[in-house]
Amino acid sequence: MPDAGRTLEETAVQNAAMQAQKIISLNKFIFLSVISFGLYPIWWMFEAWRFFMQKDRLDIMPAARAVFALIFLYRLLDEIKDYAEQRGAACDFSTGFLYGGFLILSLLARLPDPYWLVSVFAFIFLIPAFQALNHAKRNTHELNIIEARSFSIPQILLIIIGAIFWLLLFAAFILSDQLQ
């Protein structure tokens, strides 16, 4: 549904200027989040902010908002919820709960070995927003949606580097147990 102040033609022109929206599956999001030690959600936040910047013609810096996610995440989750509800998604999640859960799990990265690993799973609190944004994009007929069936080259590199770090981490845990 276009904004009241815009005509259908203005909305179509605005959406035509937007980049094609790539959508990955929930399983890929979870896998990339775990393999990257929870860093992939920062990229997802960047992409989400860039989407809203283009859609609403905002004067924001998506990269800065993604890097400083603990400051801007609540607003992003709120934007996603509003947009998804406008597109017919049933968003029964609480923005405050998702933000609080993500914040708490992210801060647990300061715990000693191996307990800090629980912070890798902070992305779990982003899943409802991830699904809502994907639903909303799919139900915005003016958008050019690309469903990613396979991993992109940057994602493959992320998987390789992440796998190496996971192997090194497990090796360090095993070796530290043997040395004691």
Image (cartoon, rainbow, N blue to C red):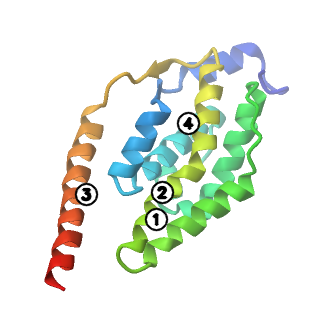
Q: Which circle marks residue 166 in the picture? A: 3
Q: Can residue 60 be seen in the rendering of this structure? A: no
Where does label 4 land, which residue? 51
Q: Say if 15 sits above or below 121 in the image.
A: above
**Label 4 to label 3: alpha-carbon separation:** 31 Å
Where does label 1 land, which residue? 118
- Say which label, 4 or 1, has the lower sequence index: 4
Image coordinates of residue 12 in percent, x first then y, are 65, 16
Q: Can residue 169 be seen in the rendering of this structure? A: yes
| Secondary structure type for disc 4 | helix
Residue lying at 65% horizontally and 19% vertically, measured from the top left: 139
Residue lying at 32% horizontally and 25% vertically, measured from the top left: 150
* Numbered marks: total: 4
Residue lying at 77% horizontally and 29% vertically, measured from the top left: 86
Q: Say if 80 sits above or below 85 in the image.
A: below
Amino acid marked by disc 1 = Val
Mark in the foreground, 4 or 1? 1
Image coordinates of residue 64 in percent, x first then y, are 49, 58
